[in-house]
Amino acid sequence: MRRDIHLKLILPSLTEATSGGWRSIKYSLFPPLGLATLAAYAPSDWKITLCDEHVQQFDGEDDPDLVAIQIYVTSARRSYEIADHYRRRGATVVLGGLHPTSVPFEALAHADALVLGPAEEAWPRFLRDFQAGRPRRLYKSRERTLENLPPIRRDLIDRRLYLVPNSVIVSRGCPHACDFCYKTSFFRGGKSFYTYTVDRAMEEIAPMPGRHTFFLDDNILGNRPFAEALFTAMAGCGKIWQGAATVASLRDETLLKKAVAAGLRSIFIGFESLNEEALRRRTGSSSPSLLDIRGLEF
């Protein structure tokens, strides 16, 4: 395979971002860190471009060799249009994200390969197979770890296009298993909550320009030993930050004080229901997963 490969990473727009019934500014808050993470695994001599359709005009007249598209349920129709377009132009198209993981048979009709669930181990394996000229149809992570994650390609992100360019993710998943959440299906088959090392987290947080940082983790307080060590390391950095957590985690006053000393200024809490019976049932049911890929090989 020739070495001058062009990899194009695309985040198609969500339907609600373009419908006019929602505040479009909401969808320009944070850059697509997931795609920038995938870019970090590509060979250094590849040409890599990143398109976030929420803040950029999509140009489909180029001819990339490899196209990777991240899909959510409300961007599926648009994502499939883009995928079909590039396959007609001769590109190899890989789809991943929440929607393909939930309905892989649907997504396979529009892709040369799927990456199901977390991509940190599966995506590099696909890249090796692609370079060898023998990519498979399905890839699913065999190991869940962030220990060898390369530096995220933030150079591919135009900071001027986002309200909160200093966003960061230092964990994957959540320690809880609420039945209304994507987590159980997306992380099926392996660990569903794991973190950076503190040193790796600080390597990403400390160099960011300016004071403000936003943690996009599902639950920044979910792993107490990690959170405590991270906040201790951040205490002298002069950062001001926000994040998300659960009501239960906020009962840990000692940890919360450490977070405030490290620069915490606000925490986002998601109230999925105000009905007590619904809240009691939310983690007790065993509703079937949309993901059923028995019989398929990885």
Image (cartoon, rainbow, N blue to C red):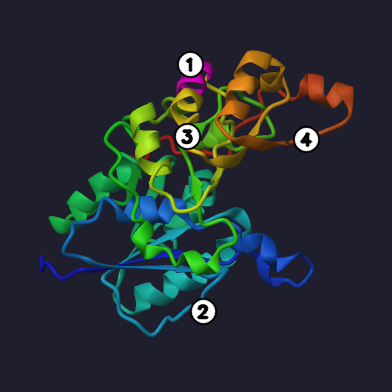
Q: Which residue is mark 3?
A: 172
Residue 180, x across and y down, in percent:
69, 34
Q: Nearer the viewer, mark 1 or mark 3?
A: 1
Q: Residue 206 has which mark? A: none
**SS for callout 2:** loop
Dominant secondary-structure state across the stretch colored magenta: helix
In the image, the segment drawn in magenta is 224-229
Structural distance between the alpha carbons of marks 1 and 4: 27 Å
Which of the 4 image quadrants contains residue 179?
Answer: top right
**SS for callout 4:** loop
Sequence-earlier tag: 3 or 4: 3
Q: Which residue is mark 2?
A: 57
- Amino acid type of the residue that numbered disc 4 sits on in the rendered structure: Glu
Sequence-earlier tag: 1 or 3: 3
At a point 57% along the width and 24% down the height, the residue shown is 222
- Does residue 227 show up magenta in the picture? yes
Circle 2 residues within 10 Å: few <14, some 14–19, many ≥20: few
Is there a contact, CB below 8 Å, between mark 1 and mark 4? no
Sequence-earlier tag: 1 or 2: 2
